[in-house]
């Protein structure tokens, strides 16, 4: 388990992480989600003991990182794409790390095989592509067979096959009962990889919820196409629904079911060319969560509103 | 997928200096660049020492009485170590700065969060490797250099002060290397750390020599040439052991400041 307890980290006058508290439990993949610059990487560096904190602390398996007896056997992290000397081979890099924590040399062979770098193990790692460098970083994280794993934007630079492989890997690690924290700014990636989400924005906790809860929060929208959009919009608004006109001239309606919309249209003799229930995009949902960050902080979570309201809020 | 039972040879205690030394040794031994630098330095050093010995000896028949009075054949052959005054500290700097420039520092400190242990292990591994290399160079240069002295008076290891000069000169370069290692921790960027070394080791002594008095004798290169590596001491210089002590002090300060900064700064 990882615990982040009231952590504040400043760089000069910039506060990167502000009084952040959350826990990462074992047995599931926790997605660490936030826009670029939200403080995800800083938080991970604090967990790893790389960065000193201005307040609070982070615990790994109940201990501060520096107090771990054999750190690599407790927690493995892949934070930076290149965390190796370019003149050293992948194998030597891993052998040096293994020696530091008295990890058996056979693990080096095992993890090289696991990430698919066996054929290039004696090549200088400086010549690796981004995808291969990511694989070497993942191998280093797995080296001590740790129960806790941290990955910071691990799929950048992986090819489609690599992305699929990585998703299966983290799923497997969580299924074995390990704690997995995986950061990303892509909510679509989280939707396929994560069971649980910790969402941060501007260094604050925005939301902590399961992926299923997030999906449930999505406003139910109905997509409508009609030759008389203005008239229908007026009628639906009278009925208390929220209507937004999309770039393709279709309407996105919130606050009413397809049945209600169809009944209203039939009543006034308006033809419908399309009537389809849909979810707001995950990205919209995410924008909404992070935009609402201030409200969440004051303890008043706002229910997900209609898509149109988001645009107004951002314009103000 | 992964076998938790197939674990490493778990010891019940905690990672320690022994593990970190092993790790640092693996790192040093797996970098071709550092090995080739030491080999190149060895070849240059021996060649230079023998050449300087031969040239000085060829001047002996026509040398003045004063030159003959200060004749120090040990010191002549030890001139082969002078390139080491640049090469070894730069290697020391790179031992640390390459970790920061490549990003491997994060891997290193993830495995060893008690960061001063890394500095201690690097000092042991690098110091040991340099000591072994430099002492071999020193003795080979000495024996080869004395062999080409011709008619000029030779030195032998048995003469008073000679063995001390040979051993301390090698150890001097180890200390300079560790001094550079400390600078690498303090500055973290290769170019800046090397520039700082050049300023302290090469420029500062020149400035000191512009002042009246004996301040110049505290410059590291003066200590190598005139104190540690000399058998017949010129007037005004530090005695060999005092010189060695002064240099040890420089190194200890550099490493201690580095160790403190290493704990306090973010990686």
Image (spheres, coloured by chain):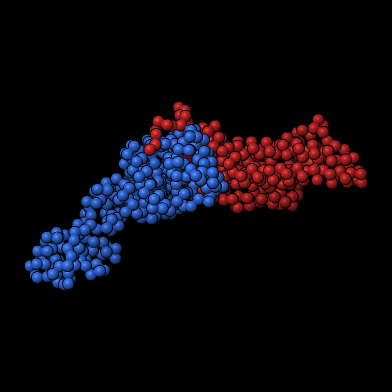
Give the left or right position of residue B190, taking residue A315 as reference. right
* Chain represented in blue: A
Quadrant of the rendered image containing residue A174: top left
Point 14% across, 66% down: residue: A236
> Please, is residue A293 above or below residue A146 in the view?
below
Q: Residue furthest front?
A: A119
Foreground residue among B125 and A126: A126
Work out whether A262 lies above or below B38.
below
**Residue A67 visible to the viewer:** no
Q: Which residue shows up at 69% across the image and 52% down it?
A: B203
Q: Nearer the viewer, residue B240 or A26?
A: A26
A313 to the left or right of A3: left
What is the quadrant of residue A233 in the picture? bottom left
Which quadrant of the figure contains the N terminus of chain A? top left
Relative image position of residue B266 (x, y in whole percent): 48, 46
- Shown in red, the chain is B
- Relative side of A2 to B13, left or right: left
């Amino acid at each position: 388990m990882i615990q982040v307890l009231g952590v504040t980290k400043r760089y000069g006058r910039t506060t990167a992480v502000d009084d952040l508290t959350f826990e990462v439990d074992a047995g599931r993949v926790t997605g660490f989600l936030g826009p670029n610059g939200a403080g995800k990487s800083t938080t991970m560096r604090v967990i790893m003991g790389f960065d000193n904190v201005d307040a609070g602390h982070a615990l790994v398996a109940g201990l501060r990182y520096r107090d771990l007896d054999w750190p690599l056997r407790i927690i493995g992290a892949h934070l930076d794409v290149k965390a190796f000397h370019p003149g050293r081979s992948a194998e030597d890099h891993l052998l040096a790390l293994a020696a530091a924590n008295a990890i058996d040399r056979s693990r080096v062979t095992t993890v090289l095989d696991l990430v698919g770098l066996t054929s290039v193990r004696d090549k200088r790692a400086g010549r690796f592509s981004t995808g291969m460098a990511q694989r070497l970083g993942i191998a280093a994280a797995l080296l001590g067979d740790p129960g806790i794993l941290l990955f910071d934007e691990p799929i950048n630079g992986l090819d489609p096959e690599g992305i699929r492989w990585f998703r299966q890997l983290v799923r497997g690690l969580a299924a074995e009962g390990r704690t997995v924290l995986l950061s990303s700014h892509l909510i679509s990636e989280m939707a396929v990889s994560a069971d649980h989400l910790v969402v941060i924005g501007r260094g604050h906790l925005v939301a902590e919820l399961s992926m299923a809860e997030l999906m449930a929060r999505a406003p139910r929208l109905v997509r409508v196409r009609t030759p008389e959009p203005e008239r229908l919009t007026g009628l639906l608004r009278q009925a208390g629904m929220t209507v937004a006109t999309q770039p393709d001239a279709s309407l996105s309606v919130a606050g009413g079911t397809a049945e209600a919309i169809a009944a209203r249209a039939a009543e006034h003799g308006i033809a419908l060319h399309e009537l389809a229930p849909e979810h707001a995009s995950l990205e919209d949902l995410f924008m909404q969560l992070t935009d609402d960050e201030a409200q969440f902080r004051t303890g008043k979570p706002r229910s997900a509103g209609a898509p149109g309201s988001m645009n107004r809020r951002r314009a103000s | 997928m992964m076998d938790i039972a197939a674990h490493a040879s778990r010891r019940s205690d905690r990672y320690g200096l022994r593990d970190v030394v092993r790790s640092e040794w693996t790192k040093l031994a797996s970098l071709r660049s550092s090995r080739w630098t030491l080999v190149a330095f060895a070849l240059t050093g021996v060649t230079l020492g023998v050449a300087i010995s031969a040239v000085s000896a060829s001047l002996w028949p026509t040398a003045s009485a004063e030159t003959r009075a200060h004749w120090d054949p040990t010191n002549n052959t030890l001139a082969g170590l002078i390139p080491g005054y640049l090469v070894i500290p730069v290697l020391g700097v790179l031992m640390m700065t390459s970790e920061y420039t490549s990003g491997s520092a994060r891997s290193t400190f993830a495995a060893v969060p008690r960061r001063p242990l890394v500095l201690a292990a690097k000092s042991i591994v690098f110091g040991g490797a340099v000591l072994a290399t430099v002492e071999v160079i020193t003795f080979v240069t000495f024996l080869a250099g004395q062999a080409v002295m011709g008619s000029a008076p030779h030195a032998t290891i048995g003469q008073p002060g000679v063995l001390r000069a040979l051993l301390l000169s090698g150890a001097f370069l180890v200390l300079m290397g560790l001094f550079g290692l400390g600078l690498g921790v303090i500055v973290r960027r290769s170019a800046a750390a090397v520039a700082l070394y050049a300023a302290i080791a090469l420029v500062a002594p020149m400035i000191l020599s512009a002042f009246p008095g004996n301040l110049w004798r505290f410059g590291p290169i003066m200590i190598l040439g005139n104190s540690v590596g000399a058998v017949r001491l010129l007037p005004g210089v530090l005695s060999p052991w005092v010189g060695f002590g002064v240099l040890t002090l420089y190194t200890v300060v550099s490493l201690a400041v580095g160790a403190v900064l290493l704990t306090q700064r973010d990686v």
